[in-house]
Image (cartoon, helix red, strand yellow):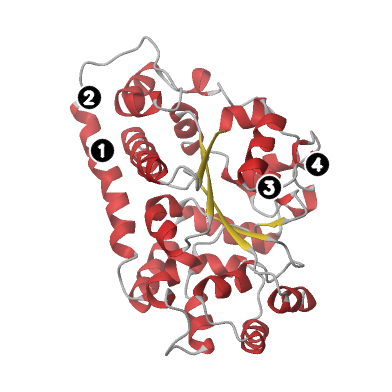
């Protein structure tokens, strides 16, 4: 591991940066596993450290010490999912003389891998900060995955990521994807859109398009029908489906599992936005949303405001708030339990 990091830091070639973004349960993990099959790409487990550190370190290590940078890095809770030794990371950054923020991010992203020309960060949270990342990583490319809003919400109702409130989940799907769509229109050459449905039904064709976007030679292993990950490598329960080959079983599962009322509410909120991506509504139409949906809409919007305000706060204040949030998060408790028990 240490030799791998040394190889990354001492290489004459500076890796390129990519971001994998999209709403949770839209296929971001599937897409990341496919990309990681390419020998020139390395994307570690999902973390949000870049946006956590960006405001303070976007100018690089000027008056800030390496010790302070690494301490701030690990004040982001998701970083504890990575197996990184603080002292080793500090020594390697110091010996390489890295100062720019992007180089520091590469040191973290490539810590546990041999040198790769492309290093990536997958984060469902980064959707909200797409414009900020575009500005501060001027050569980075973004792969944005989207999924039918009904299927994505149906999947969210099965996990403990967010509150099981249909209008709230619907407005989040709408706002998240509208944010990236707007950014893509201003930066068409830097943001590539892939639909989950196309990725699982026409895997080879979609992967070839992605490789073209990244200016990489195609690698047939990326669309292999073998399982995406070895069963023993999967440590988090909600990622257990990665032990099986890519399949289309979940595309229309929502039709059997969502009620007519749920579908009507979801389509009323997301239908117009969804049509931009080729997702069309059914015949169940509402003239207006029921009053019972109003709270969910406000709650869903407040969720977005919360994260936008949170990442304006100083790192120490934000870290304190996040520790409280994660302490009461059912999803975070399950992830920690899975990692400690090494179970699926």
Label 3 packing within 10 angstroms: few (<14), some (14-19), many (20+): many
CA gap between label 2 and label 1 equals 10 Å
Label 1 packing within 10 angstroms: few (<14), some (14-19), many (20+): many
- Whichever of labels 2 and 1 marks the residue nearer the N terminus, that label is 2
Foreground mark, 1 or 4, reads 4
51 or 243: nearer the eye?
51
Where residue 13 sits: x, y (%)?
Answer: 69, 70
User: Label 4: which residue?
Assistant: 221
Asked if marks 2 and 4 touch (Cβ < 8 Å), the reply is: no
Asked if marks 2 and 1 touch (Cβ < 8 Å), the reply is: yes
What quarter of the picture does the N terminus occupy?
A: bottom right
Asked if marks 3 and 2 touch (Cβ < 8 Å), the reply is: no
Where residue 20 sits: x, y (%)?
Answer: 55, 50
Helix, strand, or loop for circle 2? loop
Relative to residue 208, is residue 81 depicted above or below? below
Asked if marks 1 and 4 touch (Cβ < 8 Å), the reply is: no
Residue at image coords 68%, 37%: 207
Mark yes or no: residue 224 visible.
yes
Helix, strand, or loop for circle 3? helix
Where residue 101 sits: x, y (%)?
Answer: 50, 74
User: Label 1: which residue?
Assistant: 297
User: Label 3: which residue?
Assistant: 35
Foreground mark, 2 or 4, reads 4
CA gap between label 2 and label 4 equals 47 Å
- Whichever of labels 1 and 3 marks the residue nearer the N terminus, that label is 3
């Amino acid at each position: 591991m240490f030799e791998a990091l040394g190889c990354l830091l001492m290489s004459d070639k500076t890796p390129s940066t990519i971001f994998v973004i999209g709403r949770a349960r839209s296929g971001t993990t599937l897409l990341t596993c496919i990309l990681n099959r390419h020998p020139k790409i390395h994307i570690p487990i999902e973390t949000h450290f870049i946006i956590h550190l960006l405001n303070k370190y976007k100018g690089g290590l000027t008056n800030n010490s390496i010790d302070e940078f690494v301490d701030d890095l690990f004040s982001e809770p998701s970083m504890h999912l990575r197996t990184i030794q603080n002292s080793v990371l500090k020594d390697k950054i110091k010996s390489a003389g890295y100062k720019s923020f992007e180089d520091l991010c590469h040191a973290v992203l490539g810590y546990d891998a041999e040198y790769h020309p492309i290093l990536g960060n997958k984060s469902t949270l980064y959707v909200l900060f797409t414009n900020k990342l575009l500005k501060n990583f001027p050569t980075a490319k973004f792969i944005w995955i989207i999924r039918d809003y009904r299927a994505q919400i149906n999947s969210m109702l099965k996990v403990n990521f967010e509150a099981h409130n249909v209008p709230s989940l619907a407005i989040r799907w709408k706002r998240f994807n509208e944010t990236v769509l707007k950014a893509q229109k201003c930066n068409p050459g830097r943001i590539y859109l892939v639909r989950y449905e196309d990725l699982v039904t026409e895997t080879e064709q979609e992967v070839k398009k992605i490789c073209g976007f990244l200016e990489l030679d195609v690698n047939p292993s990326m669309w292999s029908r073998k399982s995406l990950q070895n069963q023993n490598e999967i440590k988090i329960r909600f990622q257990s489906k990665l032990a099986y080959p890519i399949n289309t079983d979940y595309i229309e599962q929502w039709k059997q599992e969502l009620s007519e009322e749920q579908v009507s509410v979801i389509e009323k909120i997301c239908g117009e936005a969804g049509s931009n991506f080729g997702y069309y509504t059914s015949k169940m139409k509402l003239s207006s949303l029921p009053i019972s949906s109003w709270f969910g809409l406000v709650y869903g919007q407040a969720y977005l405001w919360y994260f936008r305000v949170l990442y304006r706060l100083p790192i120490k204040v934000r870290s304190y708030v996040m520790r409280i949030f994660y302490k009461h998060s059912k999803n975070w408790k399950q992830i920690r339990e899975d990692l400690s028990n090494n179970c699926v």
